[in-house]
Amino acid sequence: MTKVLVTGCAGFMGSHVVNCCIEQGYEVVGLDDLSGGFEENVNPQATFVKGDILDHALVSKLFEDHQFTYVYHLAAYAAEGLSQFIKRYNYNNNLIGSVNLINESIKHKVKCFVFTSSIAVYGTNQLPMTEELTPMPEDSYGIAKYAVEQELKASHEMFGLNYVIFRPHNVYGVRQNISDPFRNVIGIFMRKILEGEPMTIFGDGEQTRAFTCVNDITPIIVDSVKNKEAYQEVFNIGATQPYSVNALAEQIAQAMGKELKVTHLPARNEVLHAYADHQKVEKMLGYQDKTSLEDGITEMAQWVMSLSELRPTSKFTEIELTEGLPPVWLQYIT
């Protein structure tokens, strides 16, 4: 039986990848430090290992013990807006941890390393963003993701490690962590509504994103290892139709059956418009953007409203710089 490693297996996207791998008949080992995920998200048919990708001795032992055929690397701290204020934490978790996995994949002759990057690598660029553009990331998160992409390219050229890189964007859906105040705008908005508070929008709310249902992209990510034409390629993947944050807030209020209540905060330093072209992944891997924003938000809202209790809002203890930190975030740091 084919054995695979899924990092970030207890997180949102990682748990969906685990499920797809099991449906494909793979034997799955999942690694997660539970810093942003929850063990109950992990399919019981997977072997769960609680641990950190920064623990290179643990990572080495996992590869030695299991001899993985494929690696799906989704573990990351994906708070793009916060990344400028947690540079060391960001680069350790999103770059150095990835290097530990790449090293072991080379040593143990992994057939393909699948990496979830981000359209954050593009920065402010022409729209829609295409894979042919030269990445110009504008924040520490995007810089780290692009560095891993470059490391994979160098590792293939030096050692023959095959890889596939996906650049997903603004992914949402069932099992997303709605207790994190720094990332996942849809989860943040839904939690605000559940707590009877107005949704908080940075700036005028006219910034645009293409919000992506996790159900559409996970099978493509998992199946990519079967198509050798995809090896050493980079793919944008996600929804094509952009929406303003204001329109998103309206959709969420409607899906949760609540009156629209919004508070606008001072604008933060962020890319105003970000959405991508997906012709390459459609042509090579058969991707289809199937789920409308209305249907996807409705499904997630129903799940959120079915939760018996809300976990406490998570606090963050690793802030390194406070200058320029949005004041609304101060209540969530220690």
Image (spheres, rainbow, N blue to C red):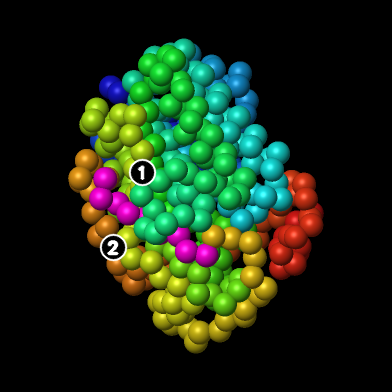
* Residue 304 vertical position relative to residue 316 in the rendered view, above or below: below
Say left or right for 184 vs 93: left
Question: What residue sits 77% from the left and 47% below the top?
Answer: 320
Local secondary structure at mark 1:
loop
Residue sitting nearer the eye, 129 or 31:
129
**Split into 4 quadrants, where in the image is the C terminus?**
bottom right
Residue 162 position by quadrant: top left
Tell me if 161 is positioned left or right of 200 in this view: left
Relative horizontal placement of residue 157, taking residue 25 as reference (left or right)? right
Assess disc 2: are there few (<14), some (14-19) or many (≥20) residues with their C-alpha within 10 Å of its C-alpha: some
Against 297, is 4 above or below?
A: above
Q: Residue at x 25, y 60 (%)?
A: 290
Q: Position of residue 322 (x, y in %)?
A: 79, 55
In depth, the one of 218 and 322 nearer the eye is 322
For the N terminus, give its image quadrant.
Answer: top left
Report the magenta residues as a range. Answer: 272-280
Q: Earlier in the sequence, mark 2 or mark 1?
A: 1
| Residue position marked by numbered label 2 in the rendering | 291
